[in-house]
Amino acid sequence: MQDRVLIQSREEKLIKQLEEIAGLDITAAVRTLGQREIYYQILRQFCSGMEETVGILKDSAEKGDWKSWTLRVHSLKSVLRTIGMRTLGEEAAQLEEVGRAEVASVCRERTITFCTALIDLQKKLRGTGLFTSLRETVPTKIRLGVLQDKLIALKYACNGHNSKEIEARLADIRNVSLSETADKSLLVISSLIDSFDYDEAVDKIDRLLHSLQKPQHMEEFSILIIDDEEINLQTLQFILGTEYILSTACTGADALRQLEDNLPDLILLDIMLPDISGFELLEKLKSNPATVQIPVIIVTGLSGEEEEERGFFLGAVDYITKPFNNAIVRARVKTHIRMISHIRTIEKLSMIDPLTSIANRRSFDKRMRVEWKLSQREDSNIAFLMIDIDKFKDYNDTYGHPQGDVLLKAVAHTIETSILRASDLVARLGGEEFGVILPDTSLEDSLVVAERIRANVASLQVPLANGFLTRITISIGVVSASAQTMSMEDFISQADKNLYKAKEEGRNRVSWGAL
């Protein structure tokens, strides 16, 4: 309890000191960012890198390296606006325009004045309690699952009334942050424990855990943030880090390297990068089949309509302007993530047979192409089982089409449960015909699978509406080969010929033949 009083006292003093700095609008900055902790963190980062920033500005102005100079001024413009130094931020914006015109004498003169103002601001910030620890560490944003695990461990410790274990577990959550509501609950839990009211603390932990529960089927989405400014990266990580899986890249080249290995669901792209224009990178992304479908949100401090129009023309889906507004960033990202989720649902439904709930022909064709390329590359065998229900037309004519649908669903389920590997695919190819793709499977092994499917279907009893049971059999044509030895069309045709052979030989059997 005393620790919290001390922290509160230090923070009140710090706020007063910051408010005394001319031009620093702390209220507006905190309102925009959403939390004071991230604001303090940005201020510290701003101060710690100031000597290097000023050195780069002066050096690039002296050498006439206006690209590096403009890039640095552009970043400072956004950062200054973020921390609430609007007037100095506007000075950076005006300086950026002068730099674009490359008026050397004016740029050098104004650079010196601007750098003096930056160093003066740094000194004033360092003179506050900003670098006196308000707490052991700045609150760390953590993922939901991590906080849940920590809370469960704390709950068990409280149940056991083990003070040392409780203190150790409580230390794990004192400096974490998830959301405003959860953070308030954590403070209440901490206060109850400090008062030795462990039973009430357990009740509050249970309530918090219940509120944090999310559906098991909830998807996790990944976002790649491409920005060369460390403060921007930290801010976006703080805003989005608890809801999404984040990765970062500081250059266009680094982003392209990462995209070769992992494709995110969404990209946040800064326009001003050190090695390539963000517009050029966007053009590359939209011309690459692997990344063309990934939505890209432009992140920029540029405010011109021409830049915005160019971004949309090249394929961007939205814009986020700097300085970042916590609520706006989260809302815009959430909007596009929700659209991605809806598109995935539609795509998933379009790949599933509505009657049997297994893969449909479209899904089969897509998967077969993937596995065929893999077989070609690795020279491994791929097996395919073509399955047909024997005398299905007679069954339909005898019992009616609704009962035929019942049979199709029962057979599909039986085939699917006969497959033991997650890598195998069962699909309805059309009517009473099914297909099974078995990657990396020899003829001998595929015959074992085929016989298991045939036997399981033969033992299947399908009930009629009146309670009577019906039986059915299937015929299976099997083929197994390396994709290096034949075309995919011939491969599938061979399975069809083997299925026809099984029918000719009396049905209810597995057939294969020489390729």
Image: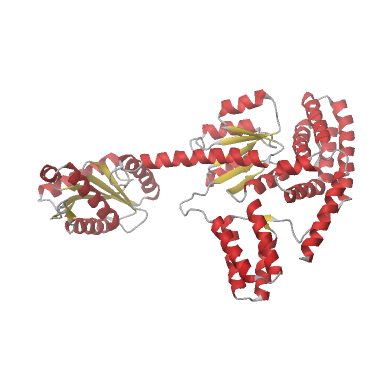
Where is residue 260? Give x, y as percent: 53, 44
Where is residue 466? Give x, y as percent: 14, 52
Which residue shows up at 51% across the image and 54% down it? 214
On screen, residue 468 versus residue 381, left or right, reads left
Between 507 and 26, the residue placed more toward the observer is 26
Q: Is residue 485 above or below residue 203?
A: above
Image quadrant of residue 314? top right
On screen, residue 405 versus residue 96, left or right, reads left
Where is residue 183? Give x, y as percent: 66, 55
Where is residue 232? Give x, y as percent: 70, 43
Image quadrant of residue 62? top right
On screen, residue 338 versus residue 330, left or right, reads left
On screen, residue 8 versus residue 359, left or right, reads right
Q: Quadrant of the N terminus?
A: bottom right
Q: Is residue 119 above or below residue 198?
A: above
Which residue shows up at 50% across the image and 36% down it? 293
Between 58 and 333, the residue placed more toward the observer is 333
Between 219 and 274, the residue placed more toward the observer is 219
